[in-house]
Structures are given as structure tokens and as C-alpha cells.
Amino acid sequence: MRVAAALLSYASLALAGNLFARQGSCTSDDACESVCRAPSVSGTLDGKSITPNEAVQAEARRRYQDFHCENKKCVCAITSDDQAQDFCKYWIENAKEEFNGARYLNGGLDQDKGSIYCVYVTGG
């Protein structure tokens, strides 16, 4: 059994507490929707770069990503390990062709790196 890790990094995001802050300026929460839902998720599986298809990204973010306008800056958030784990599960369940038979093992927030990590197991 091999363990494959997928690190989902949010390009140009900075970690602020449990929130990922983007540099988009705003005056209302609605103004942050497009900024926070821009396709910026990437990962690796067995050393190969993978990116969820747009439909998976859009639905996963609709379900698990929150967005707010704070101090005239957009704040995009997956705020808990549970949300990060749900995101990892949703990704593998809805993009099986990208994972070559892997299955979800674990995931969560890596606050030091400002990223979500997903661990998938390949093989028997």
C-alpha cells in the first residue's frame, strides 16, 4: 500500500488565523464571491500535479468555502479541519478518474503553510 499526499495550496492566499485572506478590495461580502471562487486549487498525487476539474472546484467551494469583506479586503475561508476533510472527500469522490484508484485516508488544515492537505492511499 502506498500513501499519496495531495497538498491543496491556494495561490496568492495568506493565512490569517483560520482564514485565507485575498488581496481583492471590497465594500460588501457579495463583491468577494468571484475573488474567493476563482480557480486556484492544485495538488499532487504520487508526485504528479493534479487540479480538480472546474465543476468539482465550483461545487466544493460552493459547499465548503465561505467569503466575507473585512476591512475592505476579501477573506476566503475554509475554517476547520472538518471542512478541509469534506473538501478532500468531495474531490476524490467526484473526480475519480484523476486519482487512479486511490482512496481518501486523511486531511485537514496546515496552518503553518496556509494550505489544505489531503492524504490518499493507492494500491491494495
Image (tube, rainbow, N blue to C red):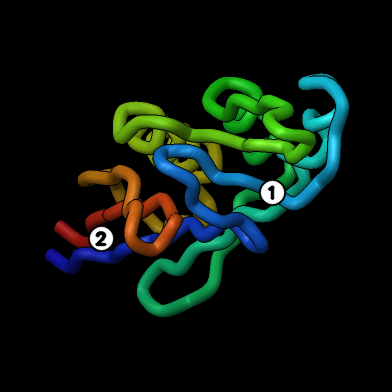
Q: Which quadrant is home to the C terminus?
A: bottom left
Which amino acid, by three-letter code, is at mark 2? Thr
Q: Is residue 110 left or right of residue 39?
A: left
Residue farthest front in this picture: 71
Where's residue 54, x and y in %? Answer: 74, 44
Residue at numbered disc 1: 22
Q: Is residue 106 left or right of residue 73?
A: left
Q: In which image quadrant can residue 81 be found?
A: top left
Picture residue at 39% right of the left edge, 63% below the top: 113
Residue at numbered disc 2: 122
* Sequence-earlier tag: 1 or 2: 1
Residue 57, above or below 15: above
Q: Which quadrant is home to the N terminus?
A: bottom left
Q: Is residue 70 left or right of residue 38?
A: left
Residues packed near mark 2 inside 10 Å, few (<14), some (14 to 19) or many (20 plus): some
Secondary element at tag 1:
strand
